[in-house]
Amino acid sequence: MNHNELLLAFYGDDFTGSTDAMEALARSGYRTVLFLEAPSLDRLKKFEGIRCIGVAGTSRAKSPEDMEAELRPVFEKLSMSGAPLVHYKTCSTFDSSPEVGSVGHAIGVARDYFPDQVTVPLLVGAPRLGRYTLFGQHFAKMHDTVYRLDRHPVMSKHPSTPMHEADLRLHLAQQTADSITLMDIVELDGDNDTVLRRYRDKLGEKPGILLFDALDEDRLKRCGQLIQDKPEGAGAFVVGSSGVEYALAAHWDELGLASPSSENNKPDATIRPTDAILVVSGSASPVSQLQIERAIAEGYHGMRITPAMIGGTDDAARLGLVQQAVDKLQEGQSVVLYTALGPEDEAIGETRTRLKTMGLSGAEAGEYIGRSLGKLTKHVMDQAGLRRIVIAGGDTSGFVTSEMGAYGLEMIWDVSPGAPLCKVYSDDASLDGLELALKGGQLGSPDYFIKVRDAGFPEPDQ
């Protein structure tokens, strides 16, 4: 593959967010493959017609020191990939703090690989996902209501990175010494020349970071044009949610770069609904709670993964859980395994206490939970002969997927905004071709797990 054909390379700070970015590109006609580590040229040559590449990471759940160890080799490779833009993809609710998943620290690391760039564009709003930035204040939709981020029922109480400040400039200022300025909703209005002049004026002030408001699709596309054009002072590196991908794709479409009729971007007619899937949830969000409860009400067999199973002190119960799940799946019944039912579940505190006695807390505890769930998922999958799995929980998904042995993913079905069904690429023949959906805690309708099971074309009439 000729690297000059690439339009974008991105790194996602968690796995579900990475599939969200991939979906935003793929559904617009830009073939995108998501890798678990920065791909070699030989790896890329296995794919035809790639326009965008991504690397799914786990920096959102890590300390600044561990983030740096993960990000440096990725930034180095992506900066030399030949892609004209490199995107550090954050969650659309900007989950971050100085101690965990620091976006400010990630920007600081990136400056070593983009040394000539003065100002880093930041775009967090993604209207298609119900995420909006207005005069610097960030809002997120939950069900049918839009909340300011510091009053959001979930994000204001997030167990790792609670959002107590809705002004993204003030929130980010706790993570970086860079100056932060704003291109607000009013400044994004007007003809192209006027908006570009305003943007250049902002860049002339030489801020370290320039935040864009995002309220609707028209102004989001305008942001994509400004980011793509890279006036003096801006550069190849950009930060933000999948709003960046939606903005760029909208602008690329105007330039005629999309290939929506490409065979690589059509749903595969061989994808079929399946009788039974495995769902593994490490999410404590109320959205995931509703999805679990709905699935059980629809006939899924629900089983709790106890803190003792995660902590490795009850191997007999864990093995029993695996065997029961395998039995149900082989009988044709879908299974949902979960660590918690909502943010008030007592198991959350019990798990923290148990892991703390093991010397694990914060980011280390999150990684331990994820890898434990990954091993459990692999055991069930190997024994049950599954072809479709769902992993719920942004911080969980990355560790689970890496434990399973995948090296790449590609979207095959647009199940729900930000949470598509993907095809797994693996050097392990038993895993290669598995259908996998990765769902962040805040994403998907209450019947999401049912939709994943039923995704695909029905069998043709004989």
Image (tube, rainbow, N blue to C red):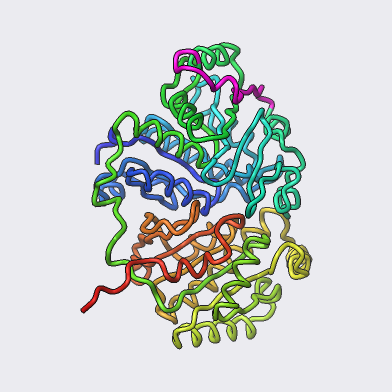
In the depicted structure, whether residue 274 falls above or below residue 160: below
- Residue at 66% over, 22% down: 179
Task: Report the front residue among 424 and 437.
Answer: 437
In the depicted structure, whether residue 272 falls above or below residue 343: below
Q: Horizontal placement of 200 versus 382: left or right? A: right
- Residue at 25% over, 44% down: 49
Disc count in the image? 0
Quadrant of the rendered image containing residue 426: bottom left
Q: Give the x, y percent position of residue 17.
A: 52, 49
Quarter placement of the C terminus: bottom left
Q: Which residue lies most toward the front here?
A: 144
Q: Give the x, y percent position of residue 324.
A: 55, 86
**Could you tell me what secondary structure mostly forms the magenta stretch?**
loop
- Residue at 44% over, 64% down: 436
Instruction: For residue 209, say whether it is visible.
Output: no
Task: Report the front residue among 447 and 372.
Answer: 447
Q: Which residues are magenta?
A: 177-194
| Residue 105 on the magenta segment | no
| Residue 183 on the magenta segment | yes
Q: Give the x, y percent position of residue 75.
A: 47, 37
Q: Give the x, y percent position of residue 98.
A: 71, 40
Instruction: For residue 43, say whether it is visible.
Output: yes
Quarter placement of the N terminus: top left
- Residue at 34% over, 70% down: 272
Quadrant of the rendered image containing residue 7: top left
Q: Horizontal placement of 421 versus 156: left or right? A: left
Quadrant of the rendered image containing residue 76: top left
